[in-house]
Image: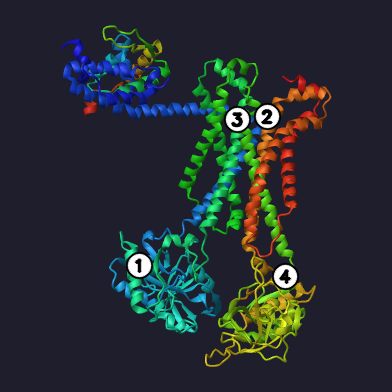
Amino acid sequence: MGILTLNEETILIALYRLGGRSHGPDLREKIIALTGRAIVYGTLYNSLEYLIRKGYVLSSKGAPTSTRGGKAKSIYSLTPEGREALLETRRLHKRLWEGLNKADLQG
Amino acid sequence: MSEKSNYSPSGRPPRLFRRLLALMAVYEAHHTFHEDLEESFRRLAARRGNRIARRWYAGQVLRSLPGALRISLANGMALLGSHVRLTWRGLVRSRLYSLITISGLAIGLAAAILVFLYIRFESSFDRYHPGAERIYRIVDNEFTGVPYILGDHLIGQSPEIENLVRLKELTFWWDYVLRAGEREILEDGLYAADPALFEVFSYNFLQGDAEGALAHPRALVMTAGAARRCFDSVQVLGETVFIQDIPFQVTAVIEDPPPNTHFHFNLIAPTSAVPEISAYRDDDWTSWTSSNYKTYVKLRPKTDPSLIESRINDLFRSAREDAPEKHLQSLVEIHLHSQLRSELEPNGDARRLRFAAAIGMVILVIALLNFTNLASARSLQRGREVGLRKVLGARRPQLARQFVGEAVTYSTLAAGLALGLVPVLLPLSRRLTGAELAWESVPWPALILFLIVIIGLTGAAAGAYPAFLASGFQPVRALRGERPASAGRVPLRDLLVGVQFLVSILFVFGTLVIQGQMRYMRNKNLGLEGDRIVVIDLPKAARPRMSALRTELVHLPGVAAITASDFLPSGNTQRVGYEWEGRLETREAALWKVAVDTDFIPLFGIEMAAGERFSDRHTPGASYIVNQTAARLIGEGRVESVIGKILRQGTWSSRPGPIVGVVRDFHFRSLHHAVEPMALFLDTSRDVVRSSRNGTYRHEPFRYLSLKISAGALADTLPAMAEVVRRFIPYAPDSWFFFDSDFDRLYASEQRTASFMLTLSLTAVALAAMGLLGLSLYAVERRRKEIGIRRVLGASTSAVLILFSRDFFRIHLTAMAVGFPLITWIMRSWLADFAYRIGLGAGFFAATAALTTAVFFAASGLLVVKSASESPASSLRRE
């Protein structure tokens, strides 16, 4: 299993926090809220493309929402493999930070 | 804010950027870019207003573009990879087909690349000098040179001229023997030039620098080549070289000039040294009538050359009245467009270049036609596969993409193979074109671009046609193995084959005629016997010692006879004015002038028609023999009557004297020309040069010494003769040659055309044959069962063969019907250049027809015969 990039990790976490299921605009806003940085749709999609190919995220068409008068949007959902990847990444973070503390880093 | 206001025009995302979203179709599969953006836009607009939202929208679109592009590219590569895999499988499966397709295109491409390199080389002349487009040569409509003094006047009053250089080739009219240490060398390419030479033109200095190179009148600049010939080294700064016994000091050594410049020198002395070393101490420096100096000007940027032109013409008009109109000739156009008198070197010819370009295109087009043909044949063959894919949901663009991808893969392989072929073929094309093509100087970026264009073109042409054809198949019928109604007889394919046949016929016929004319010229009775004659061409410095040399050579065993002359029947001489007794016209008649000694006529086996040969009884410088054509002119038709008539030549080289004989006409120029009137006059090979202009008779020392070697003695005599020559002319020991080979030199251009045409014909015919082979491969494959059934029902192999070749024959006949009138017309105009020529007999037509038929029949019939002779049982069982 490949290691997730920070971008991909952020997307997966945001999706997870949204209950594992969201459409693009909500996902994007969640990411911005979490990181405090704006993300361009293209960047988001490119990372999602990778996650979809890996099987961590599933993209499907949602029902057209009558309230918006719009067409169907893509709905992204976190797959079990995606959850597993997220857990693995978390374990990796733990190992990486093991035995280090803030004071040392600030030197 | 009501919901509705979001749909007011200003509440919509900017239209232009919404359109741009279409570029990012790559996201369509998994994302709803448009809708997502729209939603975010609305949210933002509600929060912070339309203006900010619109700007945000634009930013999102623009900043997403690069990423989308990257993804599409990656996807494209992946797709290409799968096509390449598929193509490779197909390639391995049908090896013969692939071999024919790829090598056919590779041959065509290699030919095109060679032509491309040739054209690039020829049009690259002198472009490497910095600011080359601002450099001009001052010429008129006849000569390339102008008076020396023009430069002085011009530079003084023209601030628009950045620089001006005058140069002159001293070896143009005279031979110079250099002395360097112990060594004496006859060097060609001795130039005199102004010091500005190195500022106007660009040279690489190996030793010394441009500044001091021609600063003092005894300075000498050598090329690396000349330095090695004189000193075996390029470290020769400060060495002394004697020219006409005047010491010169080497001040710089430069790299040999590259091949793509219109003049090449070996040594340069300053113009200030010219009066000392020039053979002709003429009024070079002050005269307004001489034309000895090539003068180049480099104009300042944005200067109008016509301004300088008019100033030059004003200068001339104030100096002399009848000055011919001068103009500026662009440096970069000299090589291809200048054909004036006294060019420093023979220049190229833009016409020849255009011809080569046309030929290259024709070959390339044939190769492309072949490729398209084979690809289409193959695609029809794969009807079933296409049908299956269609059933499985492949869309038409996808199918087309596969065919195009396949064609591109094939042509890329062919391009690679062609690149491998080119270095192998370079020496051959050097010989055919005479251009200094070198693999090392290949312009890679241009070549790669050229290949990419070709590959793209092939992809489009060879892929699109079959793709269009095949993807239009009805799946059901295609799956059943049926072909579309037109598949067996695509008229377009017939046309393509026809064009190839036509080109082959043209080339074969042309080659046969050229070879025929060459053979005719070689075998024609020239009126003289040229075999076993060795000619020594003496440099000017050695001519005064000719008698001594002659005495030594005549005593060699094996030398049957020896003669001295200023002319060879294979070489150039000049026409001068003559008058004779009883002539009424005031203008002198122009006759070819030839000075010979008493042995010339018998040695070359020239026969007498009347009178007697030169002998010791006749007065040197005042006895003439004319040829029959001249005798008819002088005697007004009665050849015999000219004997005894007094002939007067309008130059200093001889005195008036009687005509003592008439020789039979012999050919002394190439057979392009009819025999023209000629007068030989008797001279002696004496040692002294009496060049006084006061005398009535100025003897020019003979140039050539011709030896007739006894039959069978050649092998023994040649080394002895070469030894004597080396002793007498140590600085130019190789100045001898066989008369025969010199005569062949007259036809060097035709010989080159002949080899060129032969190569082209072979290529064209080979390509056409390969195409046929490929087509018949498919025809046979497709109709294998049919062949089997026909055989079972009793058809003979030849009957099957005829059945299969009928179509090709029909096309071939049509091609001949079109081609023969066309090529007859072309070859007539080619032959019209020769005064003595062959006729276009029926033999040429028959031979062309037979040759092409045989090749094409073999190519198309080979596989048919193979298939027809296999047991019907095996072909019928196959499925």
Q: Are marks 2 and 4 in contact (CB under 8 Å)?
A: no
Q: Are marks 3 and 1 in contact (CB under 8 Å)?
A: no
Task: Give the foreground label among 2 and 4.
Answer: 4
For this rendering, which residue is in front, B708 or B582? B582
First in sequence, mark 3 or 1: give its number: 1
Q: Are marks 4 and 3 in contact (CB under 8 Å)?
A: no
Q: Are marks 4 and 3 on the same chain?
A: yes
Q: Mark 1 — on which chain does it sit?
A: B
Q: How is the image coloured?
A: rainbow
| Residue B372 lies in quadrant | top right
Q: Which residue is mark 4?
A: B526
Gap between marks 2 and 1 measured at Cα: 67 Å
In the rendered image, is residue B766 in sight?
A: no
Determine whether, in the image, residue B827 is placed left or right of residue B20.
right
Helix, strand or loop status at disc 1: helix
Helix, strand or loop status at disc 3: helix
Q: Is residue B725 above or below residue B510?
A: below
Gap between marks 2 and 3 measured at Cα: 10 Å
The kind of residue tagged 3 is Ser
The kind of residue tagged 1 is Glu
Q: Residues within 10 Å of mark 4 (few under 14, many from 20)?
A: some
The kind of residue tagged 2 is Tyr
First in sequence, mark 4 or 1: give its number: 1
Q: Which residue is mark 3?
A: B376
| Residue B33 lies in quadrant | top left
Helix, strand or loop status at disc 4: loop
Q: Which residue is mark 1?
A: B309
Q: Are marks 2 and 4 on the same chain?
A: yes
Determine whether, in the image, residue B161 is placed left or right of residue B479.
left
Gap between marks 2 and 4 measured at Cα: 55 Å
Residue drawn at point x = 31 percent, y = 21 percent: A98
Q: Are marks 3 and 1 on the same chain?
A: yes
